[in-house]
Image (spheres, rainbow, N blue to C red):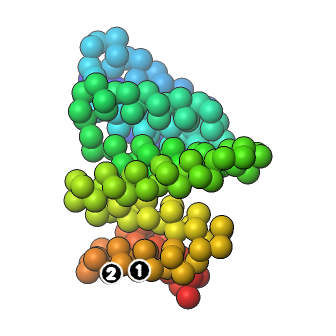
Amino acid sequence: MTRGWGGVVHGHAVVVEGQHHAAGIAEIQGSLAMLRAIGTEMARTGFLFWLADALAHVGQLDRGLEALAEADEMHDRTGEGYYESEIHRLKGELLLMHAAGGQANAGHEAEMCFQRAIEIAARKGARLHELRAVISLSRLWQKIGKPEQAREKLAVIYGWFTEGFEDPSLKEAKSLLDELH
C-alpha cells in the first residue's frame, strides 16, 4: 500500500517539477490501479485530485476534469472530504483553461465552482483552502472587470493570517492584492 501512495506523490512531483510528464502521469495512474487492485480506497479522493492537478499541468484538461469527477463521486460515496473544496477550485481552474479555447459559459461555471469551494472550505474551517479558492475567484473577477470586489474579498481572507507568509498561497495572495491596488 505504501508503494502505491508513494507512487502517486512521486509521480505528481515529477510532473509539477517539469520533469518527464508522461512518466509522472503513468506512475500516478499505475499507483491508483495498484491500490484499487488490492482493494484500497483510503485517500483515493486526494490521489485523484493530484492526478487531475498533474493532468492540468500538462494541458490535458478533459482528462483532468474526468479525474475530478471521479474524485467528487468518491467523496460522495465515502465522505472522505479533505480535498472536497480543492476539487471544486481545480474544476473551476480547468474550466477557465477551457474558456481560453472558446467555451462560452466556462467563466460563469468556473465562478460557481470557486464559490462552492469557498463555501465548503469556510464550513470546514479550512482557511488555506478557502484562501486558495478566493485567489482563484479574485483572479477571475479581476479579468472580468470586478477588481474592487476581488480586492475586498481577498483582503479580508488574507487578513486572517498572522504567520506563515512564506507559504506559496499566501505569497500569491499578497502579490494579487498588490496588483489589485
Numbered disc total: 2
Instruction: Please state if 47 lies on the left or on the right of 160 as rendered.
Output: right
Q: Position of residue 20 (x, y in %)?
A: 61, 38
Q: From the viewer's perspective, is residue 140 above or below residue 5?
A: below
Where does residue 161 sit, x and y in percent of width and height?
A: 28, 76
Mark 1 crowdedness (10 Å alpha carbons): few <14, some 14-19, many ≥20: some
Distance between mark 2 and mark 1 Cα atoms:
6 Å
- Closer-to-camera residue (33/48): 48
Q: Residue at x 51, y 63 (%)?
A: 137
Name above or below for residue 96 compared with residue 133: above
Residue furthest top in the image: 37
Of the 4 image quadrants, the one containing the C terminus is: bottom right
Q: Residue at x 59, y 74 (%)?
A: 146
Asked if residue 87 can be seen in this view, the reply is yes
Q: Which of the image's four quarters has the N terminus?
A: top left
Task: Work out whether residue 28 can be spotted.
Answer: no
Residue linked to disc 2: 159
Horizontal side of residue 111 vs 145, given as left or right: left
Q: Amino acid at mark 1?
A: Ala
- Residue beneath disc 1: 155
Residue 98's quadrant in the figure? top right
CB of mark 2 within 8 Å of CB of mark 1? yes
User: Percent x, y for residue 64?
Assistant: 55, 35
